[in-house]
Image: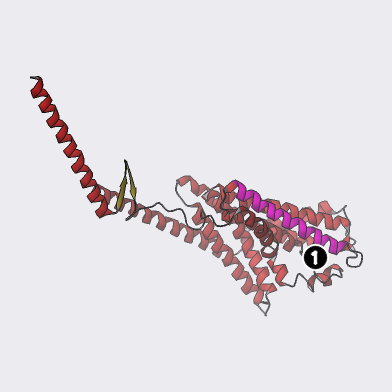
Amino acid sequence: RRDSWEEGHRGRLCALALTRISGDWLTRATSHLCGVKRKESHVTVQHPVAVEREPAGWSVARLPTFALVPLAAFVWWIVGFLPWVLDGFGSARFRQTSGLQAHWLAIPLFNGDIGGLGLGAGTGGLLVGLVALLGRDGPGRSAIAAATGGVLGMIVILVLTRVQIGNGNIGRGFSADARVVNGLTLVVVLMTVIGTFVGLLGLTGSQGRGLALAGLAGAVGVWTVGVLHAAGWTDPGGYGHTADVGHWAGAGVLVLALVTLGARPISRLIGWPVAVLLAWFVAPTVTASSYIEALLRPGYGLPDRVSDTISAAAHVWRLASSPSVRSLTPWITAVVVAAVIVVGREVAAGRARDSAATDASH
């Protein structure tokens, strides 16, 4: 009985061994045909392979951390203040309105271009925050490097400009008044900090990127008009044309912002009106700050009339924010186009999932 049991046990063992060997052979043969490499108990797909790709453009690491510092400084100054740069650093315009005798100023740190000053600092700050998306060493280090570069660039340019204005052989009169220069310096710092904070929201995910792009959309419209004027597009009727180009340029960036926000999960749709409002209020802010230029002049009374000036600027801001004084066509078009793109993308993704499920079931 014992011999028969051992003989049967050996038979079962041989059958299991043959099954294992034939199964391994079949697995290797199938793997060879399908392009699947089998190693130990793990299966690694070589080709064909279905890899979940990261969203294009945003998550691709490109630059080391140290490279973000000079890039952010450059972007803050040259790109943020590009209208001023293309205008020859205000070589002619500011000398006519400020009483300054400098050949050029690094940024418009005088009372004759407060709107351009705030716009350049805010736009530069936004771009500094978005530069952090190009880092390859993680969001924390990239944010610190980009913010450091932006702040260093701002400090260097502010010091350079203040030296130009404060030099007794260069600056004179109201524009060289320490209260004016210090107040405008504070404007640059605040707008840069706010812009950088909004730009760095891009590191928090697609919702943050959408809001950062929405802020940029609001600034791009006014910034584009300034660039076109500085580039010489000032022919008769040119302002209307450049304004239209600016409106549609901002609408294009707003489409990108809304598409970045997306609609899945459905709660992300709450971010759409927030993004639109953020973009909407940028231009009125620039308009209100430009209105201060007419009030900030010699003999108007500093600092006694500052509160009146701010109150008047706030009134202008409310008027400029009214839909009745804005062209709504670019805004409506941007929302509709973004909605069509998002819905189309969701439909295509749903069809791809259904097709994948069908293939898997077969």
Q: Where is residue 194 in the image (x, y as percent from the top left)?
A: 68, 51
Who's the residue at 61% across and 56% down the image? 131
Indicate the colouring scheme.
Answer: secondary structure
If the image is split into quadrants, where does the N terminus sit? Answer: top left
Residue 17, relative to residue 71: is it above or below? above
Q: Name the residue under label 1.
A: 112
Name the residue rendered at 79%, 72% in the picture: 93
Q: What stretch is highlighted in magenta?
A: 140-166
104, above or below 158, in the image: below
In the rendered image, residue 157 lying in the magenta stretch gets the answer: yes
**Image: 187 above or below 97:** above
Q: Where is residue 288 in the image (x, y as percent from the top left)?
A: 73, 59
Residue nearest the observer in this picture, 213 or 6? 6
Q: Quadrant of residue 215?
A: bottom right
Q: Which residue lies furthest to the front in this view?
A: 3
Camera-side residue of 297 and 141: 141
- Kind of residue at disc 1: Gly
User: Is residue 270 one of those drawn in magenta?
Assistant: no
